[in-house]
C-alpha cells in the first residue's frame, strides 16, 4: 500500500488526513491518526517507469498535482481533483 519510490511532496487536509505524492507516479491519501492508507487518488499509467508527481497543492476542496517525467514517458501537466464537484 505504501509508495514504491521516494515521496516528492505532501499536503495536509486536516489533522487526520494527508496526501503524499511520489516518484512512482502515485498520490495516496493517508489517515495519520489510524496510521492507514485510505485510497489511491492518482496512479499514472507510466508510474514507476518515469512518470512522477512532482508537487501537490490544495484548497479545502481541490488538490492540484504537478506531473512530469524523467524520460518523456509522461506529458508535463497539472491534474486537478475537485472534491466538491457534482458527480454526473
Image (cartoon, grey):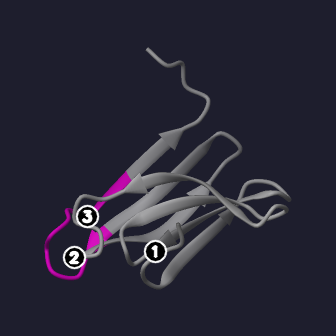
Q: Is residue 52 left or right of residue 70?
A: right
Q: Residue furthest left?
A: 72
Say whether residue 63 is left or right of residue 26. right
Residue with the most extreme top position: 88
Residue 87 vs 79, above or below: the answer is: above
Helix, strand or loop for the magenta stretch, by majority = loop
Of the two numbered discs 1 and 3 in the rendering, the one whose residue sits closer to the viewer:
1
Label whose residue precedes the other's in the sequence (2 or 1):
1
Helix, strand or loop for disc 3? loop
State which tag comes first along the sequence, 2 or 3: 2
Q: At which x and y percent is residue 15?
A: 86, 59
Q: Secondary structure at mark 1?
A: strand
Which residue is disc 2 drawn over?
49
Say what secondary structure mark 2 lies in: loop
Q: Determine the CA span between mark 1 and mark 3.
A: 15 Å
Q: Nearer the viewer, residue 58 or 4?
A: 4
Residue 12: name its quadrant.
bottom right
Q: Is residue 70 left or right of residue 12?
A: left
Residue at 49% across / 19% down in the picture?
87
Residue 70 image point, x, y percent = 23, 82
Residue beneath the point at 82% across and 57% down: 16
Task: Name the mark on residue 22.
Answer: 1
x and y percentages locating residue 85 in the rendered image: 55, 25
Question: In the picture, residue 42 is in which quadrant?
Answer: bottom left
Magenta span contains residue 70: yes
Crowdedness near tag 2: few (<14), some (14–19) or many (≥20) residues, C-alpha within 10 Å: some
Q: Residue at x 49, y 61 (%)?
A: 27
Quarter of the figure that contains the C terminus: top left
Specify the quadrant of the image occupied by residue 19.
Answer: bottom right
**Mark identifier at residue 76:** 3
The span shown in magenta is 68-78
Disc 2 and disc 3 in contact, CB within 8 angstroms: no
Amino acid at each position: 500500500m505504501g509508495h514504491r519510490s521516494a515521496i516528492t511532496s505532501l499536503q495536509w487536509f486536516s489533522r487526520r488526513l494527508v496526501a503524499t505524492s511520489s516518484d512512482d507516479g502515485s498520490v495516496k491519501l493517508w489517515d495519520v491518526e489510524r496510521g492507514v492508507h485510505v485510497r489511491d487518488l492518482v496512479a499514472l499509467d507510466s508510474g514507476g517507469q518515469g512518470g512522477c508527481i512532482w508537487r501537490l497543492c490544495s484548497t479545502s476542496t481541490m488538490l492540484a498535482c504537478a506531473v512530469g517525467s524523467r524520460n518523456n514517458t509522461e506529458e508535463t501537466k497539472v491534474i486537478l481533483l475537485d472534491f466538491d464537484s457534482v458527480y454526473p
